[in-house]
């Protein structure tokens, strides 16, 4: 079963890319939004990645250092994609303008597949 994907139009994707860049100060390739439980309650956590050919898998994390950046990014994506299931982690491909539910893939050695 495949996860639902939402796609933005070219202009919409460029606008969102520019807003994310303004928030982080970097041109991003991917954003992952996860809701986590803390003692104070639920919080949004954003993982922001920039393209980097020297990094593992071609991406490097862009640290979010200013107060509120995680929440601002999460709410921006949530408002842009209101029909996504925000009870699950979501991956936004900034280049393609596509939001998908984050899927954790099991390694072949755990699924019984040959290596």
Image (cartoon, rainbow, N blue to C red):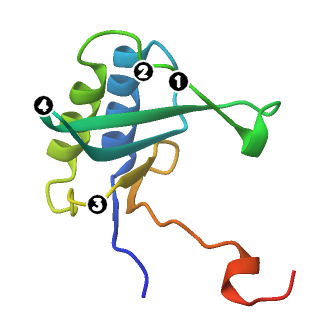
Question: Position of 86 compared to 108: left or right?
Answer: left
Q: What secondary structure is marked by label 3?
A: loop
Is 17 in front, or is 84?
84
Give the labeled residue for mark 3. Answer: 88
Q: What secondary structure is marked by label 4?
A: loop
Give residue 19's quadrant in the image: top left
Is 74 in front, or is 79?
74
Question: Position of 21 compared to 104: left or right?
Answer: left
Quadrant of the image for the N terminus?
bottom left
Give the labeled residue for mark 2. Answer: 21
Q: Position of residue 103 (x, y in %)?
A: 47, 66
Give residue 79's quadrant in the image: top left
Q: Residues within 10 Å of mark 2 (few under 14, many from 20)?
A: few
Mark 1 or mark 4: name the one nearer the start of the chain.
Answer: 1
Measured Cα–Cα span from mark 1 to mark 4: 32 Å
Q: Are marks 2 and 1 in contact (CB under 8 Å)?
A: yes
Give the labeled residue for mark 4. Answer: 40
Give the labeled residue for mark 1. Answer: 27
Measured Cα–Cα span from mark 2 to mark 4: 29 Å
């Amino acid at each position: 079963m495949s996860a639902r994907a939402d796609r933005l139009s070219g202009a919409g994707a460029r606008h969102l890319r520019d807003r994310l860049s303004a928030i982080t100060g970097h041109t991003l390739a991917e954003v992952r939004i996860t809701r986590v439980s803390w003692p104070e309650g639920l919080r949004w956590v954003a993982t922001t990645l920039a393209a980097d050919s020297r990094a593992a898998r071609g991406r490097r994390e862009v640290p979010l250092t200013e107060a509120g950046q995680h929440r601002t990014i999460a709410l921006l994506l949530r408002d842009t994609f209101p029909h996504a299931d925000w009870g699950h982690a979501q991956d936004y491909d900034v280049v393609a303008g596509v939001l998908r539910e984050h899927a954790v893939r099991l390694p072949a050695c755990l699924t019984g597949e040959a290596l």
